[in-house]
Image (cartoon, rainbow, N blue to C red):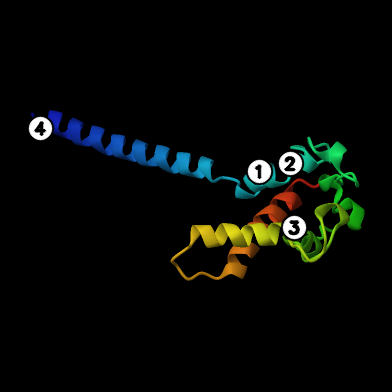
């Protein structure tokens, strides 16, 4: 009887540990790369899933989207994080992104924040910056050497 109880306790411990590990792995997989998910949802339509400028809408644009995997190479080997951040949030104008006075993604992220936190005080600029930095970090990782 004592051996059966020890076996049952061991089985419960193993089951709980396994369930916990699986839940953690699932959560990590679901949120493993928010920058990539953001890129795929917001940028790939023009820049392509491979970020080389071959998105579905690329043919319809006045100016062809650049190959985003060459940003560092085209900047002397240094990834231009601050400039890319400004382009994404609209503070640095790009002709194909629309007029300079309309910060495309900064405005969109501000609207997202307002919907997400309707009754809670939040720092809008911090929310926008976090979303932009996820994209910038992802783009920095996909640079060709």
User: Marks 2 and 1, how far apart in space?
Assistant: 7 Å
Residue at 82% over, 45% down = 69
User: Marks 3 and 2, how far apart in space?
Assistant: 13 Å
Q: Are marks 2 and 1 in contact (CB under 8 Å)?
A: yes
Q: Which residue is mark 4?
A: 2
Question: Nearer the viewer's eye, disc 4 or disc 1?
Answer: 1
> Residue 70's x, y, as percent?
86, 48
Q: Which residue is mark 2?
A: 44
Q: Quadrant of residue 53?
A: top right
Q: How many residues crowd around disc 2 within 10 Å: few (fewer than 14), some, or many (20 or more)?
A: many
Query: Quick check: can you spot residue 145?
Result: no
Q: Earlier in the sequence, mark 4 or mark 2?
A: 4
> Residue 3's x, y, as percent?
14, 30
Q: How many residues crowd around disc 1 within 10 Å: few (fewer than 14), some, or many (20 or more)?
A: few
82 and 42: which is toward the camera: 42
Q: Are marks 4 and 2 in contact (CB under 8 Å)?
A: no
Q: Which residue is mark 3?
A: 88
Q: Secondary structure at mark 4?
A: helix
Residue at 47% over, 43% down = 27
Q: Which residue is mark 1?
A: 41
Q: How many residues crowd around disc 3 within 10 Å: few (fewer than 14), some, or many (20 or more)?
A: many
55 and 74: which is toward the camera: 55
Q: Is residue 59 above or below residue 118?
A: above
């Amino acid at each position: 009887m004592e051996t059966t109880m020890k076996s049952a306790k061991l089985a419960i411990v193993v089951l709980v540990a396994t369930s916990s590990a699986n839940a953690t792995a699932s959560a990590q997989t679901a949120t493993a790369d928010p920058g990539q998910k953001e890129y795929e949802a917001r940028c790939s339509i023009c820049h392509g899933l491979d970020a080389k400028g071959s998105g579905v809408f690329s043919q319809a644009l006045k100016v062809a989207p650049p190959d985003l995997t060459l940003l560092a190479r085209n900047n002397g080997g240094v990834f231009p994080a601050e400039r890319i951040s400004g382009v994404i949030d609209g503070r640095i104008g790009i002709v194909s992104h629309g007029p300079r006075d309309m910060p495309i993604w900064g405005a969109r992220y501000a609207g997202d924040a307002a919907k997400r936190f309707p009754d809670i005080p939040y720092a809008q600029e911090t929310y926008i910056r976090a979303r932009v930095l996820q994209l910038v970090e992802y783009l920095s990782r996909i640079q060709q050497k």
